Amino acid sequence: MQDTFKLLFIGDIVGRSGRRVVEKFLVEDGNAKNYDFIIANVENASHGFGLTKKNHDELLSYGINAMTSGNHIWDKKDVFSYIDESPALIRPYNYHSSTPGVGYKIFNDKIIIINLLGKTFMPPIDCPFVSLDKIFDELKQNDILQDKIVFVDFHAEATAEKQCLAKYAASLGASAVIGTHTHVPTADETIFENHCAYLTDVGYCGSANGIIGMEYQASLKRLITSMNERFEVETTMPYILNACEIEFSGNCATSIMRKKFEFSDDKEQEIEN
């Protein structure tokens, strides 16, 4: 019997509030040791937009093994100074090939992490379906794919695009496709073709009092007036962590479970889904 491999995927970390709840869950409460591998989406981790080198190193120190991202990964310009050397950070593959960083990475000769951007309701980008074909062709040509877990963070807006890409990825041999970007967790976790775990959106980490992690008043003003408004990260407690746990036997997903953790100054609780 093959050993079980237990993975935690943490949803979009939003600013200081998001980093704090991740630290609480992984480090102070000691949950990092419960997983064989931990991935987090970090494109909003520094003041809600992008990722600084300081916060990159901070998150690594919490026990996070791999960092995926999305359309905001370039918002903090010092990312260009370290992305090529980062052992963990991945940018969406379907940016132009001249873009710094890599769109997929192999970890521990066990798991391949792929990052893709959707194109529906998103900035112009290469087709994620064609990009996925290119990645799998490259992995097969280099004899890298066999027996490895293939995890895809699909950073996209449209639900239909996420579902369709996940089924397509499953047909190619992907082990998991988890959606990010909307910051709103969905309740549709499933396993496609008896091997590929799927969840439309894993949600976000940050203040529960904001609008997808940002201050309410700025969001309200922008939606009412249609004028650009400077967004600030909401910092009031309670803080929430949204994630999902996936177990694998070999390179096949055998279970997926949403996970929600909440804490404030005087209480903490794990919420069962």
Image: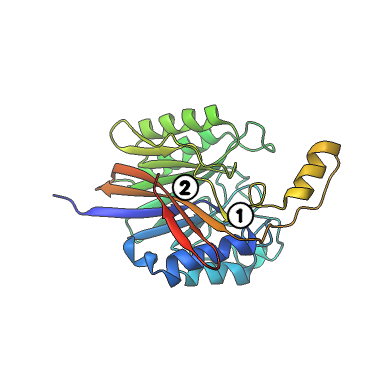
Quarter occupied by the C terminus: top left
**Residue at point 58% right, 45% down?**
183
Image-based side of 123 in relation to 221, left or right: left
73 vs 246, left or right, is right
Residue 31 in percent (x, y) is at 38, 65
Q: Earlier in the sequence, mark 1 or mark 2?
A: 1
**x 62%, y 34%: residue:** 119
Please report the residue visible at 34 percent of the width from the left and 60 percent of the height from the top: 35
Q: Position of residue 76 (x, y in %)?
A: 70, 61
Q: CB atoms at circles 1 and 2 under 8 Å apart?
A: no
Image location (x, y in percent) of residue 130 = 52, 33
Residue occupying the far front of the picture: 266
Distance of label 1 from label 2 (alpha carbons): 15 Å
Q: Is residue 32 above or below residue 120?
A: below
Q: Tell me how the rendering is colored.
A: rainbow
Seen from this angle, which residue lies furthest left?
1
Instruction: Evaluate whether residue 177 shows in this view.
Output: yes
Query: Which amino acid type is marked by label 2?
Result: Ile
Mark 1 element type: loop
Question: What SS does tag 2 mark?
Answer: strand
Q: Nearer the viewer, residue 142 or 184?
A: 184
| Depth order, front residue of 27/52 | 27
Q: Which residue is mark 1?
A: 43
Q: Is residue 6 above or below residue 171?
A: below
Q: Can you see residue 148?
A: no
User: Which residue type carries mark 1?
Assistant: Glu
Residue 221, which numbered label?
A: none
The residue beneath circle 2 is: 114
